[in-house]
Image (spheres, coloured by chain):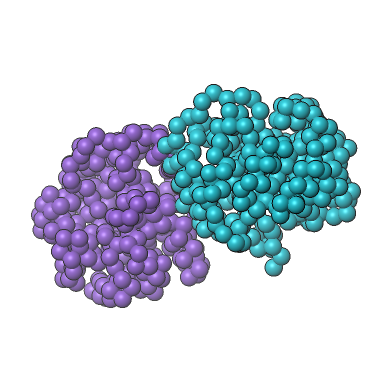
Chain colours: A cyan, B purple
Amino acid sequence: MEEVLFTDVTLRDGLQDQPAVLPTESKRRIGELLVDAGFRSLEVTSFMRPDWVPQLADPEQLLAAFQPGPGVARRVLVPNRRGLERALGTGAEAVSFVASASSAHNLANLNRSTDQTLAEIPQLVAEARAGGRRVVGGVATAFGCPFAGEVGDGEVLRVVDAYLAAGVDEVDLADTMGMATRRAFEDRLRRVARHVGGAARLGVHLHDGGTGVGDLVRAALQEGVRRFDVAIGGIGGCPFAPGAPGNARAEELVPVVEAAGFSTGIAPARLVQAALALGLALGRAPRPPARGTGRPA
Amino acid sequence: MEEVLFTDVTLRDGLQDQPAVLPTESKRRIGELLVDAGFRSLEVTSFMRPDWVPQLADPEQLLAAFQPGPGVARRVLVPNRRGLERALGTGAEAVSFVASASSAHNLANLNRSTDQTLAEIPQLVAEARAGGRRVVGGVATAFGCPFAGEVGDGEVLRVVDAYLAAGVDEVDLADTMGMATRRAFEDRLRRVARHVGGAARLGVHLHDGGTGVGDLVRAALQEGVRRFDVAIGGIGGCPFAPGAPGNARAEELVPVVEAAGFSTGIAPARLVQAALALGLALGRAPRPPARGTGRPA
């Protein structure tokens, strides 16, 4: 059976918006329960400024504490040169960069234009690869932007091309705001896949804005995509309040992918321990101090 | 496909030992997520003295707030006459009584001997049935006792016989301490089933003491048992500390039963939301005031 690779982003995208700061030890425990459930790829933290994202202020400590060993890749989000330098000082097996198709979003997210971010990409990717890390290029707002609304194919392809030219291992198209409808998603994905000669190096990062993430994943499988990001219980944003959409739910998408005839290695029933530990940790942890506005989406 | 009925006991047996007291609204929300996951039977609370079990001090309020409607039975644990009177004042569809095979445990649990408890059973069962409630008779320490150690067949059969003579709908054999090994469990179950003319009215309530609850459930299925109690994440006792064993885990036993060729109606992957909500609620809730020693096991 053909394999599909799920990356759990609970500890990064899931936690970054929570009204609580987890101790490193809680994150380590949740990471181990996610590995127990079958994940072989996890985005565990980012190297953002701790005053911007206090929830993820402990990347070095977490990577030292959480060492699941061979066969499991710990991915870290790196926003800039300083972040990459820090990441290369840890044992993280993979790094992901982020640039937004919409320059308005890039400005809000990283405090500079998409052009400015892309200008740095070739050198940063080269250094990450020289450091032996797997490299993922994330394309934020690939299916719509909260500031600009519609995002054109050209804006998306520009970022995709920059990543591929720089030599990334994978390009992830992110529906940052959970705006993609099935038709728009399918069209965009097909055009990107045709442009780059197939979906072998493409991945999809969905947020659940109510447009039917299961259908989107089925469409992506049809286009040849075999990599998806998910989080426990759709955490990210707030799963218990209306508003910003959380990540696509692991327990929803794994059965969708298995039912389509692929193997994932993940047992959703085994996520229950991780969900309970996550809830306990979030419930117990203190709220962070006030913070700035810039956060990766 | 033949059906197996799982009763979720998270809100009763799961919560009663937690170092937190949940608001009624949190319990209601968790109950609804359990129903979403497919449970059609839930033991949601007990009518114990609130100074003994402050975690379950709100049975009337919970039963008024949590009304999943037709097709879902809310079961309540009733320790005595006063508890039954309170239960009959609510809309609970099922009541469970408890008596211990070991009189030493009955004394610790209910503050009187097994004989004293059994003497009341016929009248209480009759009243519960007259009130239109489904009645379950629980046999605590049916596979071993923390005080007396070994428990004999005669001690178990005496309680089983008393329940059946009183006209209960179901008798649940409970491994209160999670002590049962496969062989001892199988032998005991077989002798009880033979004694009462089959397993049609028997159920099993397991705690996970590390003796292999999956194997015990497979053995029980072979003996004809079709009713089991479970809780999210093995909560009850503490799932995150060694010591008193928690309840058998829903996410572990549902796949065991389905793999044996039965339908359960429960999707373990859909427990993730309930587990996350449970963890958040437990993490946020305050600790209860000091309490007495008597708690149902």
Q: Position of residue B144 (x, y in %)?
A: 22, 65
Q: Position of residue A267 (x, y in %)?
A: 55, 59
| Vertical relation: B245 (above or below) A277 | below
Q: A159 or B289: which is nearer to us?
A: A159
| Vertical relation: B261 (above or below) B65 | below
The residue drawn where x is 32% and y is 62% is: B209
Q: Report whether A28 appears left or right of A168.
A: left
The residue drawn where x is 33% and y is 73% is: B182
Q: Position of residue B249 (x, y in %)?
A: 41, 57
Number of numbered discs visible in the structure rendering = 0
The residue drawn where x is 48% and y is 29% is: A287
Q: B243 or A208: which is nearer to us?
A: B243
Give the image quarter of residue B101.
bottom left
Q: Is residue B288 visible?
A: yes
Q: Report whether B184 appears left or right of A11.
A: left
Q: A110 or A274: which is nearer to us?
A: A110
Q: Report whether A43 appears left or right of B47.
A: right
Q: B88 or B239: which is nearer to us?
A: B239
Give the image quarter of residue B26.
top left
| Vertical relation: B249 (above or below) A10 | below
Give the image quarter of residue B193.
bottom left
| Vertical relation: B125 (above or below) B213 | above
Q: Is residue A190 visible?
A: no
Q: Position of residue A93 (x, y in %)?
A: 65, 53
The residue drawn where x is 85% and y is 55% is: A198
